[in-house]
Amino acid sequence: DVSDYFLCVVNDFTSLDQRYLDKLMRLLQNSSKTFREVIVVHNLKEVTHEKVLKHIWKTQVTQIYAEGAAMQTLVAARNHKGELEARQVDWFKTNFSRHVCLANHDSPLGRKINPWATSLLRYWLKSVFVPVDRDFSVVETVVRRATKRLAAFIQQPVNLTLHPGENDWTSYIK
């Protein structure tokens, strides 16, 4: 109820990650949310070669989701010279998820794909319809749920409250 969209970042897309994502997608299928997809970022931070990236992408994404489709989207980002440049970003779409990958930031491969993949992510996140006329306060909901979870975890009553921070946009839960 609190989140308008889900962004899941994985390094190595393990079977545990896949089960978690599957559970989350099943929950979203039955939800009343406008945006019912999980955005999965495959943070392949150790990958520096395109052949390795393609192999991992194939074995950890495209072969796992038979009902999915490989997609390409043209997006603009700043290249290494600081100039705006348009490039195609490869990504993968299923009924309830979108997958995109990042490579090692310091490698030529990372410099080749990361700015444009990040630009696509920004576009997805900005284009999501986020309701502003909620029937509840997100902050109060977070405090209430955190109170319940913490009390259940430590098996003692807990009373978390919101306290003002050093400026208007900072608060603390204590």
Image (cartoon, rainbow, N blue to C red):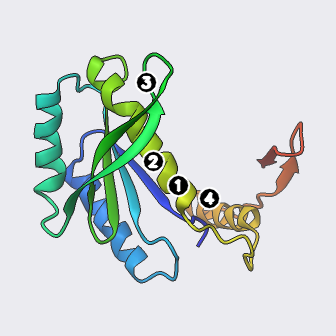
Mark 1–mark 2 Cα distance, whole angstroms, equals 6 Å
Q: Which residue is mark 1?
A: 125
User: Would you place residue 65 above or below residue 104 in this image?
Assistant: below
Question: x, y (%) of residue 44?
Answer: 28, 34
Looking at the picture, which amino acid does disc 3 mark?
Asn
* Cβ atoms under marks 2 and 4 closer than 8 Å: no
Q: Which residue is mark 2?
A: 121
Mark 2–mark 3 Cα distance, whole angstroms, equals 17 Å
Looking at the picture, which amino acid does disc 4 mark?
Leu
Q: Earlier in the sequence, mark 2 or mark 3?
A: 3
Mark 2: secondary structure? helix
* Cβ atoms under marks 4 and 3 closer than 8 Å: no
* Cβ atoms under marks 2 and 3 closer than 8 Å: no
Q: Earlier in the sequence, mark 1 or mark 4?
A: 1
Q: Quadrant of residue 4?
A: bottom right
Mark 3: secondary structure? loop
* Cβ atoms under marks 1 and 4 closer than 8 Å: no
Mark nearer the viewer, 4 or 3: 3
Q: Earlier in the sequence, mark 3 or mark 1?
A: 3
Q: Residue at x 34, y 51 (%)?
A: 73
Mark 1: secondary structure? helix
Question: x, y (%) of residue 90?
Answer: 26, 46
Looking at the picture, which amino acid does disc 2 mark?
Leu
Mark 2–mark 4 Cα distance, whole angstroms, equals 33 Å
Mark nearer the viewer, 3 or 1: 3
Mark 1–mark 4 Cα distance, whole angstroms, equals 30 Å
Q: Earlier in the sequence, mark 4 or mark 3?
A: 3
Residue 141 in sight: yes
* Cβ atoms under marks 1 and 2 closer than 8 Å: yes
Q: Which residue is mark 3?
A: 79
Mark nearer the viewer, 1 or 4: 1
Looking at the picture, which amino acid does disc 1 mark?
Leu
